[in-house]
Amino acid sequence: MKLIAYNVRDDEIPFVKAWGEKNNVEVSYSIDTLNAETVKQAQGYDGISGLQTIPYDEALFSEMKEMGISMLALRNVGLDNVDLTAAKKAGIVVTNVPAYSPASIAEFAVTLALAVNRKVGYMYHQLHELGEFHFSPDFMGQLISNQTVGVVGTGRIGREAIRMFTGLGAKVIAYSQSHLDDSDLNFTYVDSLEELLDQADVIDLHIPGVPENEHLFDEKAFKHMKSSAILINTARGSIVDTQALICALEEGEIAGAGIDTLENESADLQNSRSTAQVTDSNVLKLAKMPNVIVTPHSAFHTDEAVMNMVNISFNNLKQQLTGGEVDNLAK
Ligand code: COI
């Protein structure tokens, strides 16, 4: 069995090599994004591991079929960028890693919420943009323990976020399509997103990037939010209409944002060796705002997550290619 992983960052390489040695399987890696062209590097391999937010499209899956490669094992959770219909048509098995470390993403959402609430962006702006270093009225923050946090989505990551926010003393409300019946977490469900928008000081998103959630946060949603509220998005860029977000921030309709995921993320975002300058005008606009912290889709990025992403993805490939029962088939 020969396996190859695409879009591999330098911090993943030791885990990739260690898995190969432990399992006595030949594994290689490429720093390239996976597409119908780059997949040609996988000639002679049996399965592919991938990690990207740009599309895995029909052309890729037809090429894999032509090359006799039957499986793509993602190293991440989100399936929104996978044309599963095309994969099925080409007979390609797809797996993901549903729970590599929900706490890693939740903890980063909390980090962004605290940093925005405590005006870290204003302090950075003063030092790095103005070259000054002194107190300012702009630095007066809010205590999370005096606030209501509205968590949207109560799946694995949302539940971790609720646990962390309540641990910090916040009152937590949540909105979700499906409710947990037996949770020992200390929060209450609200009946509608509008209700959550009306009440929350911090709005924290943990829902998938499925078509139903596209632009759930649009001009109307921002008008519903308190002018003192902040939005945290470590989920998927497509959930938030970026133009509407920028407008709401410019007009003072909301007080700030922590944005780890953006619409139209580029292949370059996932190239850890890139030295390219930012050209995305939305990223440039958000980066200039002291009340916004914008980060490159990195909420997942902890040592625990990276190890699990690599190991579980390769385990899935091994299960399939040795005729075993496969965990984590994409649905
Ligand atoms: C996911 O696991 O879906 C993420 O958002 C992580 C990212 C590296 C693609």
Image (cartoon, grey):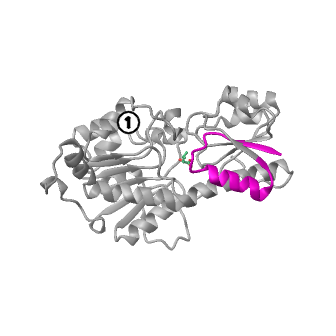
Q: Is residue 180 above or below residue 112?
A: below
Queried whether the magenta region covers residue 16, the answer comes back as: yes
Queried whether the magenta region covers residue 62, the answer comes back as: no
Q: Amino acid at mark 1?
A: Thr
User: Observer-nearest residue: 232 or 135?
Assistant: 135
Q: What is the x, y in percent for residue 39?
A: 70, 31
Q: What is the x, y in percent for residue 176?
A: 49, 55
Horizontal side, residue 48 vs residue 221: left or right: right
Horizontal side, residue 324 vs residue 54: left or right: right
Q: What is the x, y in percent for residue 106?
A: 47, 59
Q: What is the x, y in percent for residue 27?
A: 74, 46
Query: Residue 115 appears in which quarter of the rendering?
Result: bottom left
Disc 1 crowd, CA 10 A, few/some/many (<14, 14-19, 20+): many
Q: Is residue 54 above or below residue 3?
A: above
On whether ligand 1 comes within 8 Å of the CB at mark 1, the answer is no
Q: Residue at x 57, y 45 (%)?
A: 9
Is residue 81 visible in the rendered image? The answer is yes
What is the secondary structure assignment of the residue under circle 1? helix
Residue tagged 1: 242
Bounds of the magenta segment:
1-26
Q: Total number of numbered labels?
A: 1
Q: Residue at x 39, y 28 (%)?
A: 279
User: Observer-nearest residue: 196 or 258?
Assistant: 258
Is residue 312 visible in the rendered image? The answer is no
Q: Residue at x 25, y 54 (%)?
A: 119
Query: Residue 223 appears in which quarter of the rendering?
Result: top left
Q: Residue at x 65, y 38 (%)?
A: 30
User: Observer-nearest residue: 176 or 235?
Assistant: 235
Horizontal side, residue 218 vs residue 325: left or right: left
Residue lying at the far right in this picture: please name it. 323
User: Observer-nearest residue: 172 or 166?
Assistant: 166
